[in-house]
Image: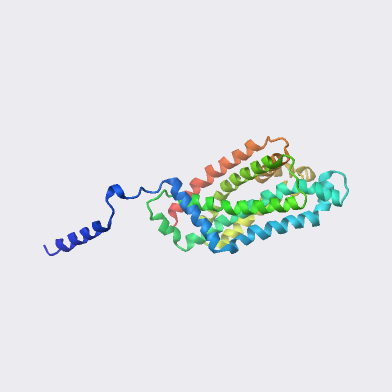
């Protein structure tokens, strides 16, 4: 009698502060919980604006440097005339801007993994996993929030590109289509860095491994020079590089040329998500 009474009183006290069952809010569905975590990722940018340094200064430096330092020499090759100078730079800008647009946004995707690794190492995701929500929403929301960083970097690159003379022949429709396609590819590619972040112990290791993967992907591609200028044995490797496939498709959309590589980009996206998202969830569920 002496033990039941306090227990009943405690139960009554708890029920007195709880809402009736029919008035309780519905549990978050996968969409709402993913959007909530996406909003969390955006708030982190708001409170730590230094995170935007890499997506603002780096694209600006790369575009200006390649246009005015290397543009004359590379433009002579791209134009096929062998002449350097102003006309060659203008020719190279038309070729180069879609490529650097892709490279910049792909490089920014690496920071998705670094940020995630930092959250996991601090134990924040242990608390998230205890919540009654769709388990992948923490990862999907983080990837959705990073779309803002990708958009900002892309707008800067295109703005600088227009300033140095880039004029897409397919107009605003082609630019918007290329932007949308690249955002989808970056979202799919981010699953690779998310997997790396869950495999490695700290953000320094994530950065090192990510750069090791990223450097050959971006430089052994058609971003800076046409594939035809490379040795015969290297050309098939570069053509099979997913980055080369995306760059070719972005150029097609912006310049209004043949768009035969769109299907290959879609295939790359499907393969990336199909392989790395399940692997990522297995690692995430086992992470302590």
Residue 48 rendering spot, x and y as whole percentages: 55, 64
Q: Is residue 89 visible?
A: yes
Way the structure is coloured: rainbow
Relative to 286, 197 lies left or right: right
Q: Residue furthest left?
A: 1
Examine the rendered structure and indicate whether residue 12 appears above or below residue 135. below
Residue 17 rendering spot, x and y as whole percentages: 27, 58
Task: Count the labels in the image.
Answer: 0
Considering depth in this image, is 176 or 135 the residue closer to the camera? 176
Q: Quadrant of the C terminus?
A: bottom left
Q: Quadrant of the N terminus?
A: bottom left
Residue at 69% in and 52% down = 157
Q: Is residue 225 visible?
A: no
Residue 285 rendering spot, x and y as whole percentages: 43, 52
Residue 144 rendering spot, x and y as whole percentages: 53, 50
Residue at 73% in and 51% down = 161
Considering depth in this image, is 25 or 141 the residue closer to the camera? 25
Residue at 78% in and 45% down = 231
Residue at 64% in and 51% down = 105
Q: For residue 268, which quarter of the picture?
A: top right
Relative to 233, 46 lies left or right: left
Q: For residue 239, which quarter of the picture?
A: top right
Considering depth in this image, is 222 or 185 the residue closer to the camera? 185
């Amino acid at each position: 009698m002496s033990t039941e009474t306090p227990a009943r009183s405690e139960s009554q006290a708890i029920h007195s502060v709880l809402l009736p069952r029919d008035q309780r809010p519905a549990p978050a569905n996968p969409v709402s919980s993913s959007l909530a975590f996406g909003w969390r990722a955006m708030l982190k940018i708001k409170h730590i604006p230094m995170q935007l340094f890499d997506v603002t200064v780096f694209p600006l430096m790369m575009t200006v440097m390649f246009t005015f330092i290397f543009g004359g020499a590379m433009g002579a090759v791209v134009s096929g005339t062998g002449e350097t100078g102003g006309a060659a730079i203008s020719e190279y800008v038309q070729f180069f801007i879609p490529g650097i647009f892709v490279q910049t946004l792909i490089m920014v995707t690496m920071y998705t993994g670094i940020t995630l690794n930092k959250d996991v190492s601090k134990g924040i995701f242990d608390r998230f996993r205890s919540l009654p929500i769709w388990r992948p929403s923490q990862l999907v929301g983080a990837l959705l929030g990073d779309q803002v960083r990708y958009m900002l970097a892309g707008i800067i690159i295109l703005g600088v590109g227009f300033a140095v003379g880039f004029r897409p022949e397919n107009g605003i429709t082609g630019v918007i289509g290329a932007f949308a396609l690249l955002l989808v590819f970056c979202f799919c590619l981010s699953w690779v860095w998310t997997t790396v972040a869950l495999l490695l112990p700290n953000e320094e290791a994530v950065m090192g491994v990510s750069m090791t993967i990223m450097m050959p992907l971006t430089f052994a591609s058609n971003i800076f020079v046409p594939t035809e200028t490379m040795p015969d044995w290297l050309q098939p490797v570069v053509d099979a590089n997913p980055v080369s496939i995306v760059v070719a498709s972005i150029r097609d959309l912006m310049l209004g040329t043949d768009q035969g590589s769109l299907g290959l980009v879609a295939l790359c996206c499907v393969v990336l998500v199909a392989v790395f998202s399940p692997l990522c969830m297995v690692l995430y569920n086992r992470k302590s």
